[in-house]
Image: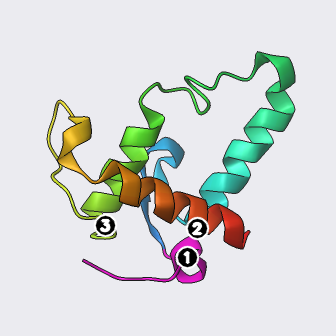
């Protein structure tokens, strides 16, 4: 598993399914925030970028990129990765923005 600081993780490029491209978490968060702003009251926390399960999908993308320990299984089980570690990683990145 690749070990990066929150600052490094923000700019590490890997495939992000919601963006349908190799990108960074920094760009992912900007896209998410832009979507929130543009959709205003119509913003869907369940499907912010068009898909439900978006948090788990991001975790699976990070597992695939060897940024998070876990198993890439379909259907995805929340028990396939350390959800607390994942949330701490994401919160750390958000705090670095």
- Dot 1 corresponds to which residue? 6
Residue 63 in the image: state x and y as whole percent.
28, 60
Examine the rendered structure and indicate whether residue 43 appears above or below residue 64: above
- The N terminus appears in which quarter of the rendering? bottom left
Along the horizontal axis of the image, is 35 left or right of 62? right
Q: Nearer the viewer, mark 3 or mark 1?
A: 1
* Left or right of 1 on screen, residue 37: right
SS label for mark 2: helix
Label 3: few (<14), some or many (≥20) within 10 Å?
some
How far apart, in angstroms, are the residues tagged by discs 1 and 2? 5 Å
Magenta includes 5?
A: yes
First to last magenta residue range: 1-12
Q: Which residue is mark 2?
A: 92
Which is more N-terminal, label 2 or label 1? 1
CB atoms at circles 3 and 1 under 8 Å apart?
no
Q: Are marks 1 and 2 in contact (CB under 8 Å)?
A: yes
* Residue at the spot 26% in from the left edge and 60% down from the top edge: 64
Q: Nearer the viewer, mark 3 or mark 2?
A: 2
Q: Which residue is mark 3?
A: 65
Q: Are marks 3 and 2 in contact (CB under 8 Å)?
A: no
Q: How far apart, in angstroms, are the residues tagged by discs 3 and 1?
A: 15 Å
- Going from N to C along the chain, the mark reached first, 3 or 1, is 1
Quadrant for residue 57, please give it.
top left
x and y percentages locating residue 8 in the rendered image: 54, 82
Q: Is residue 82 visible?
A: yes
């Amino acid at each position: 598993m690749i070990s990066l600081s929150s600052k490094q993780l923000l700019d590490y490029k890997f495939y992000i399914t919601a963006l349908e491209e190799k990108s960074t978490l920094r760009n992912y968060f900007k896209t998410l925030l832009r979507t929130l702003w543009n959709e205003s009251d119509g913003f869907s926390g369940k499907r912010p970028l068009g898909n439900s399960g978006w948090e788990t999908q991001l975790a699976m993308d990070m597992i695939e990129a060897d940024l998070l320990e876990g198993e890439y299984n379909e259907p995805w089980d929340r028990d396939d990765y350390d959800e607390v570690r994942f949330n701490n990683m994401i919160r750390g990145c958000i705090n670095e923005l």
